Amino acid sequence: MSYEGEMLEKYKMPPRHQVEKHLLETLIKHNGVIKEFTVGEDIVDEVANSFNLSYEQREAYLETIYRKENRVKKSNLWHRLLFRAASNLAKEKMITRPSKTYQLTNRREWMLTEEGFDEALRIVGIPSSQKDTLPIISYEVENITRKLLINEKPKDYLPFRKKQSSIKTTTQSIRERGFRRAVIESYGYKCAICGLKLKAPNKNVWEVEAAHIIPHSSFGKDDIWNGLSLCRFHHWTFDVGWLSLDRDYKILASTRISELPNDMGRVWNFDLMSQLENKVIELPVNKNLWPDINAIRWHRENIFK
């Protein structure tokens, strides 16, 4: 048995495969990404707490003697076990190493892959059918998100996609999740219509949603130019036609709002729809990401009432 193996046995450290399982569970809790295992990072203690590690287990060190340099290098045993577990998950393509994630996001983090996402869902008992509704990042989805945010809009851009099978493929699922992330990120996680910006307590789950201007049912593309970041209420009002936009990105309110009873469409005395009329929506800082005028025209002509 190696020196490291002896130390793991001496301090009764958890087996590596159990650490790998807990790392996948932890990645689900943290929306698919966790920081490197450096000294002082909360994630190191969080996984240790899941095993109820004692102070001695957390503080045990390996000692490596460098005789030529006449020095002793100390390595934290728990950190080493965490790193080996994560490295093995990366080898099995369940997660990406911080060096690879950094090339995509400029952040040194361990990140779930789609394969790791599937395995993590199996471990925590969440049906795979819920995958598209969860706010969890995978490397593949983040890769699509980055591309959508940096791609230049084609001069001859058309907001319609080719007709596809009704059976959703993995590629389509990744594209749709990347679309949602890119849209709400480009609008600063705010509703373009009312400016609401809010996320859940203790979780990186935002209230806003990515709305298609031309809906999927009408073959609208999963492109940032066919998207708007909207709160749940204004997503619904936009989808059913109470609100739309003109070519200058000003809010249009349906004339049929005036036909509503006085107790509808209001919060106390505030009219949630018509009082926003003629206001210019919140737009991305990068003009290249502004919604496509042709998509907006289609919405006015086909959805707006």
Image (cartoon, rainbow, N blue to C red):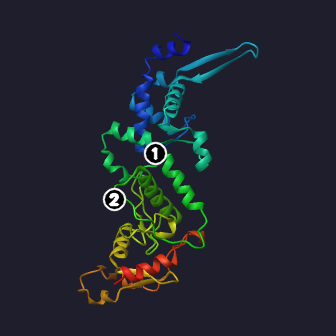
Single out the residue that lies furthest toward the top: 1
Q: Using the rendered view, name the quadrant where residue 155 is placed.
A: bottom right
Please tell me the numbered disc located at residue 146.
none
Q: Residues within 10 Å of mark 2 (few under 14, many from 20)?
A: few
| Vertical relation: 90 (above or below) 163 | above
Q: Using the rendered view, name the quadrant where residue 288 is placed.
A: bottom right
Side (left or right) of 61 relative to 241: right
Residue nearer the viewer, 71 or 145: 145
Residue nearer the viewer, 205 or 75: 205
Question: The C terminus appears in which quarter of the rendering?
Answer: bottom left
Q: Give the residue at mark 1.
A: 32
Query: What residue is at 42 percent from the left and 59 percent from the top?
Result: 206
Query: What residue is at 47 percent from the left and 13 percent from the top?
Result: 10
Instruction: Tell me the SS state at disc 2.
Output: loop
| Vertical relation: 155 (above or below) 205 | below
Residue type for callout 1: Gly
Query: What residue is at 41 percent from the left and 82 percent from the top?
Result: 300
Q: Please state the horizontal and vertical placement of residue 134, each as a whole percent of the image.
A: 37, 52
Q: Please state the horizontal and vertical placement of residue 275, each as a whole percent of the image.
A: 39, 85
Query: What residue is at 33 percent from the left and 59 percent from the top?
Result: 166
Disc 1 to disc 2: CB gap under 8 Å:
no
Q: Give the residue at mark 2.
A: 166
Residue type for callout 2: Ser
Q: Please state the horizontal and vertical placement of residue 192, each as a whole percent of the image.
A: 47, 72
In front of the other: label 1 or label 2?
2
Residue nearer the viewer, 58 or 193: 193
Instruction: Tell me the SS state at disc 1.
Output: loop
- Of the image marks 1 and 2, the number of the one nearer the N terminus: 1
